[in-house]
Amino acid sequence: MSTGNMNLTLKVWRQKNNKTKGALVDYKLADISPDMSFLEMFDVLNEQLINKGEEPVVFDHDCREGICGMCSMFINGRPHGPKDLVTTCQLHMRSFKDGDTIVVEPWRAAAFPVVKDLTVDRSAFDRVIAAGGFISVNTGNAQDANNLPIPKMQADAAFEAAACIGCGACVATCKNASAMLFVSAKISQLALLPQGQPERYRRVQSMVAQMDAEGFGNCTNTGACEAECPKGISLENIARMNRDFASAKFISEETV
Amino acid sequence: MSGFGNAFSSSIGKKFIMGITGLFLILFLIVHCGINALIFISDGGLTFNIGAHFMATNWIIRAGEIVLFIGLLAHIFQALRLTLQNQKARPVKYAVNDGKANSKWYSRSMGLLGTLLLIFLVVHLKDFWVVSRFTGIPTVDANGHEDLYAVMKEKFQDPVRVAVYILAMFSLCYHLLHGFASAFQTMGWNHSKYNGMIKRAGVWYSIIISILFAAMPIAVYFGLIQ
């Protein structure tokens, strides 16, 4: 941990678009405050690049509060950098030392093509959700809250799965670029609740089929996704998804 | 298999095949290790040869052997298919990837460990399986059974072969350390009341099986059993 301001060397992936090849480019940054967030450090870099008349580094970000799932940087070989349970925007420069070299790359997966520099296209996730990550309900008056009793443990597990912000760190860190942690969280958050039951087995089949169609890899249970997930999504969800998938394919008579 | 749709062509279906065949091979190793451990009775291989004779002549075991080879081949080919697919899922590699920060090296090296085991298996099958099934065991013991024990004693006089067998058991141990619990997770058998038990059973199983297997060439080479 540093207390004074730091001088850093950044190696940042620059890539014009999906058609061209990219490369790591070195940037020297002086006088970086340890209180800055990682993205604020990138803002400083971009200010300097703009002042020099160069192209700023393009990167995804939105809320900068660690809840939207937009920021996506692979920092020194880890998604969202060296800290556990934080997104890149909540990573602070005090986690680095004066004189450090920091390598920053985009998420790398066939299903996440690079748009430019550090920004990748994660709409594959949207299409997985659209394939079945929803419940069909009639509109009208809200039901009485106690109409559908849900055991506390069940509700908590659903809530924990629902904490997934869809950032894609699981895909980025997985040696197989597998999306199973994401997909299983999105399946579990509904499979655990009564409202998710009518479409439960149709959902798991559709979402897994879409996940496969997007070109994500296959899970080998290394557990890297769980370790790197900024929201601490559990591998238990993957087991639940596998269970539901088996039930859907081998027991349920409903085919998709 | 019209009723099952695309169950086995999907990513999870392929994993099911890996998991089920993996668990099947884990069960097989118990039988294999148990019968082989009869050499530790140290009675000149008489009991071991009874076991070997039973395994070679009982029709249920013979049928099981066919299933075993099918399971083994399915495990290997499915792994190959999955690995190729997984490599396609990340065409551009990271310049820096700190894998050790989030996962065990052996969980990321199942393909390498499996390949080492496959190479070992070719050597191992040639050493014993081909001899007992095809080329024939030259001598018989006091009970009149084929003396597979004598074949084993002769093979393990070669220090290079003993070293290869021991190294292979390190591969086996690490392959199982990940594979055992991983198979349960893949099959969806994940439950907070049993997870710890499965993990511990996997670690103990991997270590005990590997040590027992490695002890066999060592014991024979150093003449610790008669």
Image: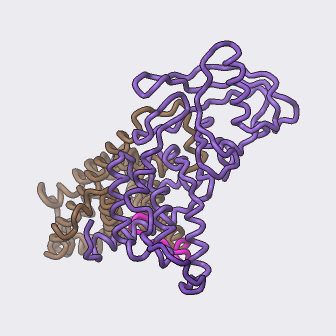
Chain colours: A purple, B brown
Q: Is residue B157 left or right of residue B104?
A: left
Q: Position of residue A162 (x, y in %)?
A: 56, 63
Q: Nearer the viewer, residue B69 or A147?
A: A147
Indicate yes or no whether the magenta region holds residue B188.
yes
Q: Nearer the viewer, residue A48 or B178?
A: A48
Q: Is residue A256 left or right of residue A42?
A: left
Q: Nearer the viewer, residue A246 or B87?
A: A246
- What range is drawn magenta here? B185-196
Tell me the residue at 62%/56% (across/down). Answer: A231
Quadrant the C terminus of chain B occupies: bottom left
The image shows residue B106, relative to residue A116, as above or below, that is below
- Magenta stretch mostly in which secondary structure? loop
Residue B161 at least partly seen: no
Residue extending farthest to the top is A52
Q: Position of residue A128 (x, y in %)?
A: 41, 54
Q: Position of residue A120 (x, y in %)?
A: 50, 37
Residue A50 at least partly seen: yes
Tell me the residue at 62%/23% (across/down). Answer: A56
The image shows residue A167, relative to residue B69, as above or below, that is above
Residue extending farthest to the right is A4
Quadrant the N terminus of chain B occupies: bottom left
